[in-house]
Image (spheres, rainbow, N blue to C red):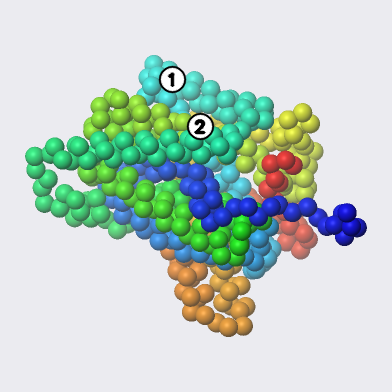
Amino acid sequence: MSDSAQLSPARLKRVLGLWDLIFIGIVIIQPIAPMGIYGIISNNAGGHVVTTILIAMVAMLFTAVSYGKMARAYPSAGSAYTYVGKEIHPALGYVTGWAMVMDYILNPLICTVLSSKLTQNILPSVPYWVLAIAFACFFTFMNLRGVKTSARINEVLASGMMIVVVIFFLFVIRFVWNLHEYGAGFFTQPFYNPETFDFTKILRGTSIAVLTYIGFDAISTFSEEVENPRRNIMLATVIVCLITGVLSSLEVYAAQLVWGSKPFPPEMVESAFPLVARRVGGFFLFHLLNFTVLIANVGSGMGAQLGAARLLYGMGRSDGIPKKFFGAIEPKHRIPRNNVIFVGAIALIGAFLINYERGTEILNFGALIAFMGVNAAAFVRYFLHAQEKQWTNLVSPLLGFVICFYIWQNLDPHAKLLGGMWMLLGIAYGAVKTRGFQADLVQFDVPPDDA
């Protein structure tokens, strides 16, 4: 072997094609993405869940284009805070990264809440507090043991979810077919019901519906393993957003044909989709949907907790936060044990302080900030600093930014207050840490799984 070959750095093999990326994206987002938040969106949007999913899809499609373009420029880094920090200003990149920290930490919290609520449908005699403790401890224990689902298991679970979705569609078709009368506008009311339509409520519902698409940006992290990444990353990101939007719209459209625009009882809002399933398929379909959503959230909760722990480890090892605690690795399982316990404790405490709806809105507060940042970075790089000004590089990121901002504005005021407090805390911390943002900023890097 030549000296040059020995000295060349190891690189990941480019083995992933376009459809490999698309399937990975669908697995990450999950085919049943809107089912957990269906009732919350419906109650906030006056039953217009389909409309909110479609509006959110438009914003996410523009944002997906921006993510794809920025992945070309930074094929190995691949994250919103990197794009913003490199293209606009390091301080704004730090702010974007701090918003992402909130997302990572809140995700296992809302999974703990929803998993507990769904389990009560199976074990109604078990108190919520017992289940919340059990799930928070289960997620933490599994991550401390270094247990994580393989890509193959995730693919099998995603395929199983698709089968459940098809079964649900068949029951809905039978239900609608057996109706004696439909009434005026029966098939169009899920899109527009004049009795309950309120554009302010639609936008409020859309601010929650954005959660349906959370995860599509992870496709950009595979840039080093993709054949022709300059083409395939953008195509896959956009196609995954489109598939998610279409499939989610069909799912909630079918549910609205059955349930209509009636609000769900507040105590059952997390179980809204299983309630719809019970109406068309009895207790068999109720428990099938309930169990499917539960399994999906258990998997998401475990993965989200480990993701949050790894992000905190990346901050700790760069001495952005106390390195001795957050930058430590447990030698046997090679995991950031302290961070896993820290995130698990936040999920447990938060499960008693924040309900699922509020947690979702605060999470989207940070996600939409990141999405706006990526659109702004794409505008700066591909239009503002470009030698040739192409109108598509102006319109696409500008529309993505404006729509995301408009949706963000319509978040619940309490969510904006809590999210704003988190952002102010981060800005104050960053200012002190970097002497008024004059020194190097915290590096919010997420280490690879074998770190």
Q: Residue 124, can we see it?
A: yes
Compared with residue 134, is residue 431 higher up or lower down, i.e. above or below?
below
Q: Give residue 322's position: percent from left, percent from top.
A: 76, 42
Q: Dot 2, crowdedness within 10 Å: few (<14), some or many (≥20)?
A: many
Q: Position of residue 287 (x, y in %)?
A: 35, 26
Above or below for 92 versus 31: below
Residue at (69, 41) in percent of width and height? 449
Q: Is residue 124 above or below residue 216?
A: above
Residue 257 lies left or right of residue 133; in this view the side is: left
**Residue placed under numbered mark 2 in the picture:** 298
Q: Which mark is residue 87?
A: none
* Sequence order check, earlier mark of 1 and 2: 1
In the rendered image, residue 421, in percent from the top left (x then y), is placed at 56, 49
What amino acid does circle 2 point to?
Val
Q: Residue at x 53, y 56 (%)?
A: 18
Q: Secondary structure at mark 2?
A: helix
Query: How far, Cα to Cα, is label 1 from label 2?
Result: 18 Å
Q: Visible in this render: residue 113?
A: no
Rendering quarter of residue 307: top right
- The residue indicated by pointer 1 is 127
For the point 56% across and 77% down, the residue is 383
Q: Secondary structure at mark 1?
A: loop
Which residue ends up furthest to the right in the rendered image? 3
Residue beneath the point at 85% across and 57% down = 5
* Quadrant into which the N terminus falls: bottom right
